[in-house]
């Protein structure tokens, strides 16, 4: 079995986005869309697509987790967050799975990474590649990869514990 293969009976290991190499020469074209100051045209295009699809969104409403990461979009009705990236940086490889873990454990919400031609579902294990069509379909799916409702962790945490004092 090669190092990139999963053991039999285990889900495949998620592939991650390629880290951009070399200096960043392009500059983001900052814009204002529906009153929100956005840092790139890709973010504006993404917000416009959300509007076309009738999906409610908030732009950078709060910092998430211990690293205080500022995720671009919160889609409250779909219980998910979307980070829009034109260029994947090495730091994102560590930070985004940590943010995904925090969102899942604390709020029962999901995190996605959206790029111009592809997308990823971000989990504590890493990045699950999605086509753009799969991305848009997955946003409206309120179950996780194991078909568990998104509030699974909250239900699990709220169950009374049977502590036995010997």
Image (cartoon, rainbow, N blue to C red):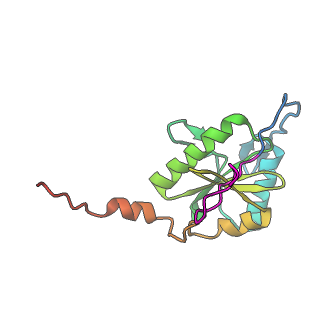
Mark count: 0
Picture coordinates of residue 120 (x, y %)? 71, 55
Picture coordinates of residue 20 (x, y %)? 80, 37
Compared to residue 137, the image places residue 34 above or below, namely: above
Queried whether the magenta region covers residue 6, the answer comes back as: yes
The residue positioned 58% from the left and 57% from the top of the image is 110
Q: Considering the image in quadrants, where does the C terminus appear?
A: bottom left
Query: Is residue 97 found left or right of 19 in the rendered image?
Result: left
Q: Quadrant of residue 138?
A: bottom right
Q: Quadrant of residue 140?
A: bottom right
For the view shown, which residue lies furthest in the front direction? 1
For the view shown, which residue lies furthest in the top direction? 23
Q: Quadrant of residue 69?
A: top right
Q: Is residue 62 visible?
A: no
Q: Considering the image in quadrants, where does the N terminus appear?
A: bottom right
Query: Is residue 130 found left or right of 141 in the rendered image?
Result: right
Picture coordinates of residue 159 (x, y %)? 30, 64
Magenta part, dominant SS = loop
Queried whether the magenta region covers residue 124, the answer comes back as: no
For the view shown, which residue lies furthest in the right direction? 25
Compared to residue 145, the image places residue 22 above or below, namely: above
The stretch in magenta equals 1-17
Q: Is residue 137 visible?
A: yes
Compared to residue 1, the image places residue 36 above or below, namely: above
Of residues 38 and 146, the one drawn nearer to the viewer in this rendering:
146
Of residues 54 and 121, the one drawn nearer to the viewer in this rendering:
121
The residue positioned 59% from the left and 46% from the top of the image is 97
Picture coordinates of residue 81 (x, y %)? 62, 54
Compared to residue 42, the image places residue 135 above or below, namely: below
The residue positioned 54% from the left and 35% from the top of the image is 67
For the view shown, which residue lies furthest in the left direction? 166
């Amino acid at each position: 079995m090669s190092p990139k293969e999963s053991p039999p009976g285990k889900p495949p290991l998620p592939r991650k986005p390629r880290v951009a190499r070399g200096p960043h020469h392009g500059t983001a074209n900052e814009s204002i869309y529906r009153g929100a100051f956005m840092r790139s045209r890709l973010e504006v295009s993404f917000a416009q697509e959300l509007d076309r699809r009738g999906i409610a969104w908030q732009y950078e409403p709060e910092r998430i987790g211990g690293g205080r990461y500022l995720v671009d979009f919160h889609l409250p009705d779909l219980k998910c967050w979307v980070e829009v990236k034109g260029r994947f940086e090495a730091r994102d490889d560590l930070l985004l799975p940590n943010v995904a873990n925090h969102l899942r454990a604390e709020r029962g919400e999901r995190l996605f990474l959206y790029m111009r031609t592809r997308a990823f579902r971000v989990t504590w294990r890493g990045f699950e590649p999605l086509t753009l069509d799969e991305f848009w379909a997955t946003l409206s799916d309120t179950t996780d990869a194991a078909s568990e409702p998104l509030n699974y962790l909250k239900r699990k945490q709220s169950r009374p514990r049977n502590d036995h004092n010997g």
